Amino acid sequence: MPIDLRSLIPTKFLNHLVQIDSALKGEGFECYLVGGSVRDLVMGKAPKEYDLTTNAEPKQVKRLFRTVIDTGIKHGTVTVVLDRTNYEITTYRIDKDYTDGRRPDNVEFGTTLSEDLKRRDFTMNALAFDISTGILVDEHFGQKDIQERTIRTIGDPIQRFSEDGLRPIRALRFASTLDFVIEPETKNAIQKTKHITKKISLERFQDEVLKSFSGPHPSRMIQLLVDENIFQIFLTNLPQILTANYHVLEKLDKTSKELIGLQLAFSFFAILEKISLKELESILRTLKFSGQNIKDCLLFFELIAKWENTEKTKKDDEFILKKEFLAPVKRHFQTRFPITPEFILKLKPIFGDTVKHFVQIWEEGPPLLLTDMKLNGNHLSETYPDLAKTKYGVILNQLLELVLRSPKENEYSRLLLHSAQFISNLTK
């Protein structure tokens, strides 16, 4: 039965999809939009990417389009590029035997759409849409499960999860990003197939975590991973039982999607508040997070811990705010992008309403780092040639402490006078 989903597809994508559909059908092949894009359309959302399926084999697809990339040709997938936009096209297939818990050992082409849909993970992802006729193919009651906001495997969940150990993690991620509930049999199968999940690559696991961060409630993903004891599959040194701090997870949901490091910091602070930075770094490296995300996470984790342990009376002390919080942020980010009041406001999940005070301080442009001072090591060398270079750091840090407390002291002549006093104190 025709259904009006085309109206939800932005014109640029719709034109491309019609072009692909026409090219394949013009040669006598079938063509359907499939998977997550159809699920999103049924939910009334415009998808960000579009995958298609066809009975044409990859070599036949490649003959029809100018720019085609062999992204997964062994498994029947090629990527057609139109106006710098990628569209994955996969040949109908049946997957044969899974021994690595991730990919089928063999695939069989030349099958039907119905057989192809049976191999997919969840009912909500086993929908196919004919772009030209408007017919929605739903052989596994996917629409019903979408309406009921339910995640359910196609067929026996233990079998489906045993085929691909990533599927349980995807179920948790979908529950988080879509705000769906995992139906009981599917949920029970997560525990019963952990030995398969353990086989997946750490990169794929962390990728699912990062995908959940783009959703409205990333806290739910972290809570589900804790509830199902999934972290311990990949991080064997963790306690067998973890609990998540609900109030910290609330802050995770309020964190800017642009600050992945801060999202990671809240995620791990919620479950491992007392962990050392060295231990946290080891965990992040084990899970294959990028170097930049690791560095950002460590900075934010330290700031969160420090702020939580700062006495309430000291949270209004400008010297503390500058030295312990603003200075580390400036040192960490200044070489990557301009630090603006808008950026500082994104740190509200850490600092609450005090973030307004941080903005006020920042806009005054106070010296925060050694590089902000009007006097440096070269000046000390010129003025005090007999001063041991090992003492430079001591003197400069004393001067920095001074200008953090009193920014007006950040003038060359004043700092020179103060440095003379500090040097004098050193020699007493």
Image (cartoon, rainbow, N blue to C red):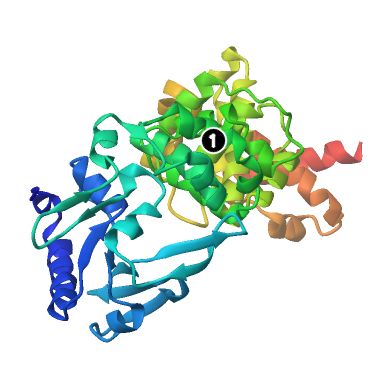
Above-or-below relation of 130 to 158: below
Residue holding disc 1 = 189
What's the residue at 15%, 74% (across, down)? 25
**Residue 201 in the image: above or below residue 414:** below
Q: Residue at x 20, y 74 (%)?
A: 29
Can you give x and y, in whole percent of width and height, for residue 330 in the image?
Answer: 54, 45
In this picture, residue 240 sits left or right of residue 129: right
Q: Of helix, strand and loop, which one carries label 1?
A: helix
Residue 417 showing in the rendered view: no
Which residue is situated farthest in the right direction here?
428
Q: Can residue 214 be seen by looking at this rendering? A: yes
Quarter location, residue 337:
bottom left
Q: Nearer the viewer, residue 47 or 334?
A: 47
Q: Nearer the viewer, residue 34 or 258?
A: 34
Note whether 232 is above or below 378 in the view shown.
above
In the image, is 299 to the left or to the right of 396?
left
Marks counted in the figure total 1
Residue 364 in the image: above or below residue 339: above
Q: Residue at x 72, y 28 (%)?
A: 240
- What amino acid is at disc 1? Ala
Q: Is residue 221 left or right of residue 191?
A: left
Quarter of the picture holding the C terminus: top right
Density class for disc 1 (Cα within 10 Å; few <14, some 14-19, many ≥20) is some
Image position of 141 (left or right of 336): left
Name which quarter of the figure residue 101 lies in.
bottom right
Q: Position of residue 224 (x, y in %)?
A: 52, 30
* Position in image of residue 137 (x %, y %): 20, 51
Residue 409 location, quadrant: top right
What is the x, y in percent for residue 22?
13, 74
